[in-house]
Amino acid sequence: MSFQETALNVHGMRTQLLTGGSGDPLLYLHSAGGEVVWLPFFELLSQHYTVYVPAHPGFSQSEGLEKIDTIEDLVFHSRNRKKP
């Protein structure tokens, strides 16, 4: 099964997204290792689910690392949130 690589604009920052398969959505958030490539287990999952693999800010082709200071920033990077 094939996958698509696209780029989303998340509050002015490019976010890389891999998508493949069909079925219920399944979101995979990569580890600090930054595995943002279509891995064999994504292929298996994509036989039953639509798999979404976004790259966190600063990983692979995603932008925005300069706006991440804490784990909270990473968790909420896609929300329109202002720092105090």
Image (spheres, rainbow, N blue to C red):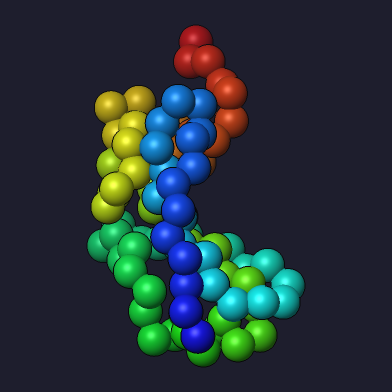
> Residue 15 in the image: x percent, y percent?
42, 43
Residue 81 lies, with reference to residue 30, above or below; the image says above
From this viewpoint, which residue is outermost toward the top?
84
> Residue 51 in the image: x percent, y percent?
57, 70
Residue 24 lies, with reference to residue 74, above or below; the image says below
Q: Nearer the viewer, residue 71 or 53?
A: 53
Task: State whether residue 68 appears in this view.
Answer: no
Q: Is residue 61 left or right of residue 81?
A: left
Residue lying at 73% horizontally and 72% vertically, measured from the top left:
24
Residue lying at 66% horizontally and 85% vertically, measured from the top left:
48
Residue 33 location, quadrant: bottom left
Residue 64 lies, with reference to residue 33, above or below; the image says above
> Residue 62 in the image: x percent, y percent?
34, 44
Query: How many marks overall?
Result: 0
Q: Nearer the viewer, residue 81 or 51?
A: 51
Residue lying at 27% horizontally and 52% vertically, measured from the top left:
60
Q: Is residue 25 left or right of residue 19?
A: right
